[in-house]
Image: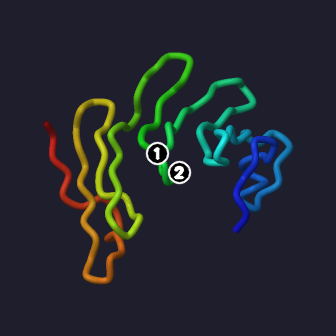
Amino acid sequence: MARPSATTPALLYLGHPCPRSARLECNTRGDVAGLIYPSTHSIGFDPNAYGEPRQVRHLPSGVEYAKSASYNQYGGMAGFTYGSTATRTITPNLRGMNRPGFQGGSNS
């Protein structure tokens, strides 16, 4: 699958053409760094060196929905912290794939 570009509408990239689709914002490496909605609201992802999102936050207000995302050696998400400081840990099965849904979260 081709990497999205800054001019590729998000819903068109996902295979659903829509004239009012959100726009992907990419960094200089071509990683998806944000999502801009037609209402001009924007969400930032702050990708790491592998292009994986480290956080999800509303850019104008700075409200964090998720932060401190970490990934396991297979590339799947290993855990993250909600904006409310509750944490989630996701454990891969024996084949290295994440189990369906979120497993084991803890509130701290």
Q: Position of residue 48 (x, y in %)?
A: 46, 45
Q: Position of residue 108 (x, y in %)?
A: 13, 36
Q: Quadrant of residue 63?
A: top left
Three-letter amino acid code of the residue under disc 2: Gly
Residue found at the very far top of the displayed protein: 61
Viewer-proximal residue, 24 or 86? 24
Q: Position of residue 46 (x, y in %)?
A: 50, 37
Q: Secondary structure at mark 1?
A: loop
Q: Determine whether 108 is above or below 18 in the image.
A: above
Q: Secondary structure at mark 2?
A: loop
Q: Quadrant of residue 97?
A: bottom left
The residue located at (67%, 40%) in the rendering is 28
The residue located at (68%, 33%) in the rendering is 36
Q: Quadrant of residue 16?
A: bottom right
* Circle 1 residue: 48
Taking the image as shown, residue 28 lies to the left or right of residue 70, namely: right
Report crowding for label 2: few under 14, some 14 to 19, many 20 or more residues within 10 A (C-alpha). Answer: some
Quarter of the rendering occupied by the N terminus: bottom right
Q: Position of residue 89 (x, y in %)?
A: 23, 54
The residue located at (24%, 66%) in the rendering is 91
* Circle 2 residue: 51
Q: Are marks 1 and 2 in contact (CB under 8 Å)?
A: yes
Viewer-proximal residue, 81 or 72? 72
Taking the image as shown, residue 25 lies to the left or right of residue 90, namely: right
The residue located at (24%, 32%) in the rendering is 85
Report crowding for label 1: few under 14, some 14 to 19, many 20 or more residues within 10 A (C-alpha). Answer: some
Viewer-proximal residue, 72 or 44? 72
Taking the image as shown, residue 60 lies to the left or right of residue 82, namely: right
CA distance for labels 1 and 2: 5 Å
